[in-house]
Image (spheres, grey):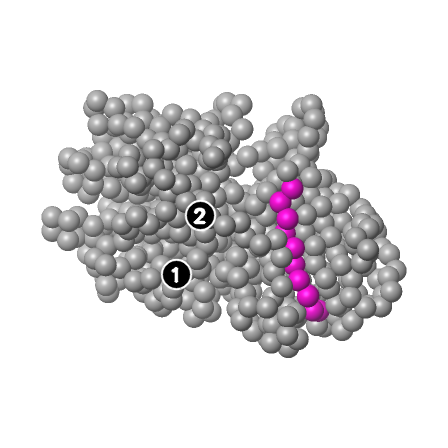
């Protein structure tokens, strides 16, 4: 068996928070402007993860107004298990603020949100003092307040506890743990760009006072040529053998200067050891993980094709700001997905991949798109009698190429190829070739576009590419959707 590699959760899966329950591990990530919100994943070995649902999968749980901006919405959950229940605390920056949801089954359903009007700031954390049962909520900044998680009531005013390294910007993503004789406060700092880092402090109580680790930051790849960059926003967990590990976000820039990451911030795994003074030691985040002294449970690869035969969409399918059953349904034409004025997609998880779909646009206009946000996307679009390649880059919107086709369903295809060869300072991270596929399998490429314009370094924000189907006018039907990783 080959050694596992990082990232353990590729594609747009930022701000990981993890908890262990017996022999099982559960992990939640930020979802920002997408609905359903907060993907929830399961693993038995910390390496192989399977999405089992979304925490916020009902419109009543997640309100994202039509004007929700790109990278608005749901920020940085903390997932914990306490008292026989799973607890998740999170911020909706586009409406509703901080809230808690709970469940006894992480696959769902999760409860309706419990608002927390006394908790301010983003990146909220939950930690319980087992000695007296007090629950502490710590937020970016870094501030803390005592909280009753059953009612949402807070006690007293928030108070500052520790704000990271002097001069370091954006102290955020606090997580508080009782490990042996100390309370440890893990913190991200330096911003979520190339300066991202993880630092730690410890104290005698959940409220401190906290003394910083003399080797802070304990994780950062800033100023290095390591292929994994922007390392930060971490959470700690114990492995099956009792050793300690860290999940954290990072990116994999491609191309020349300044380097472009297109898949978003991904989830990585790194080993943690403890020095003689009781401080965690991580070092760099490895591309290839060290040999793991516990059994691995590889998950079955998801099928290339979604035939839309299931009663409900797979939980990997997401849409900006929300969707209704009138906009996305497989009840109109059995075995086909019917779309009206909507985009529905799944995260791009491989640097090179091929996506295909069979579209019937006789009663509308729509197609296949690669989306970073509303202002940065490429698409191959079908309407009755024609297909066209569209590019949207900021304020620039253009039809790149157009072609007449016979009436009836058409197979649309996008090939994404990572840039290879010698390093070129001007090269982009990848290229996207958009076209149609004839029913004999012949591919007719209409345009090849540079991938850098669908990257965070160009568009800004916190998300990654999502690939999927859309309808802009009328009704569009999709018979199937293929997502195929390419070596």
- At horizontal 44% and vertical 57% (from top left) the residue drawn is 52
Q: What stretch is highlighted in magenta?
A: 476-486
For numbered disc 2, what is the local secondary structure?
A: loop
Mark 1 — residue?
107
Percent across and percent down for residue 468 are 64, 57
Q: Marks 1 and 2, Cα distance to the nearest angstrom?
A: 13 Å
Q: Is residue 188 visible?
A: yes
Q: Is the magenta stretch mostly helix, strand or loop?
A: strand
Q: Is residue 377 visible?
A: no
For numbered disc 1, what is the local secondary structure?
A: loop
Mark found first going from the N terminus, 1 or 2: 2
The correct choice, above or below, for 386 with respect to 391 in the image is: below
Q: Which mark is residue 168?
A: none
Left or right, 92 with reference to 303: left
Neighbor class of circle 2 (other Cα within 10 Å; few <14, some 14-19, many 20+) is many
In what quadrant of the picture does the C terminus appear? top right
Given residues 35 and 309, the one toward you in this image is: 309
Left or right, 116 with reference to 181: right
Mark 1 vs 2: CB contact within 8 A: no
Neighbor class of circle 1 (other Cα within 10 Å; few <14, some 14-19, many 20+) is some
Q: Going by the picture, which residue comes out furthest to the bottom?
A: 332
Q: Going by the picture, which residue comes out furthest to the left?
A: 131
Given residues 24 and 298, the one toward you in this image is: 298
Q: Is residue 483 magenta?
A: yes
Mark 2 — residue?
49
The correct choice, above or below, for 439 with respect to 289 in the image is: below
């Amino acid at each position: 068996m080959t050694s596992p590699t990082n990232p353990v959760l590729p594609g747009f899966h930022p701000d990981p928070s993890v908890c262990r329950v017996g022999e099982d591990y559960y992990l939640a990530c930020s979802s920002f402007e997408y609905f359903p919100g907060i993907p929830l994943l399961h693993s038995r070995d910390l390496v192989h993860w399977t999405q089992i649902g979304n925490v916020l999968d009902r419109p009543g749980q997640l309100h994202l107004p039509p004007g929700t901006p790109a990278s608005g919405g749901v920020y940085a959950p903390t997932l914990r298990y306490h008292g026989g229940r799973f607890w998740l605390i999170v911020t909706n920056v586009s409406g509703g603020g901080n809230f808690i949801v709970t469940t006894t089954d992480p696959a769902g359903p999760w409860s309706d949100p419990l608002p927390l009007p006394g908790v301010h700031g983003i990146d909220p954390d939950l930690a319980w003092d087992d000695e007296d049962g007090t629950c502490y909520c710590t937020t970016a900044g870094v501030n803390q307040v005592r909280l009753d998680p059953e009612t949402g009531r807070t006690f007293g005013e928030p108070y500052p506890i520790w704000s990271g390294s002097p001069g370091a910007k954006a102290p955020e993503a606090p997580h508080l743990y009782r490990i042996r004789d100390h309370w440890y406060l893990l913190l991200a700092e330096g911003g979520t760009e190339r300066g991202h880092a993880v630092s730690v402090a410890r104290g005698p109580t959940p409220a401190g006072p906290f003394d910083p680790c003399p080797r802070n930051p304990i994780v950062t790849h800033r100023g290095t040529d390591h292929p994994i960059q922007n390392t930060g926003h971490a959470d700690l967990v114990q492995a099956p053998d009792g050793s300690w590990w860290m999940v954290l976000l990072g990116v994999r820039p491609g191309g020349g200067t300044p380097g472009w990451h297109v898949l978003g911030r991904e989830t990585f795994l790194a080993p943690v050891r403890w020095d003689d003074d009781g401080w965690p030691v991580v070092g760099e985040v490895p591309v290839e993980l060290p040999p793991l002294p516990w059994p691995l449970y590889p998950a079955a690869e998801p099928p290339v094709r979604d035939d839309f035969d299931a009663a409900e969409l797979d939980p990997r399918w997401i849409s900006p700001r929300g969707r209704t059953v009138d906009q996305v349904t497989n009840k109109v034409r059995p075995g086909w997905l019917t779309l009206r004025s909507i985009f529905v997609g799944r995260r791009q998880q491989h640097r090179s991949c091929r996506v295909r779909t069979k579209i019937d646009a006789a009663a509308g206009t729509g197609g296949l798109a690669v989306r970073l946000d509303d202002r940065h996307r490429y698409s191959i679009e079908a309407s009755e009698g024609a297909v066209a390649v569209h590019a949207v880059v900021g304020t620039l919107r253009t039809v790149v190429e157009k072609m007449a086709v016979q009436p009836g369903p058409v197979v649309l295809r996008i090939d994404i190829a990572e840039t290879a060869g010698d390093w070129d300072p001007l090269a982009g991270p990848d290229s996207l070739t958009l076209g149609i596929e004839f029913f004999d399998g012949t591919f007719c490429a209409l345009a090849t576009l540079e991938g850098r314009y669908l990257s965070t370094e160009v568009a800004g924000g916190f998300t990654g590419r999502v690939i999927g189907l859309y309808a802009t006018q009328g009704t569009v039907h999709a018979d199937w959707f293929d997502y195929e990783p390419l070596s």
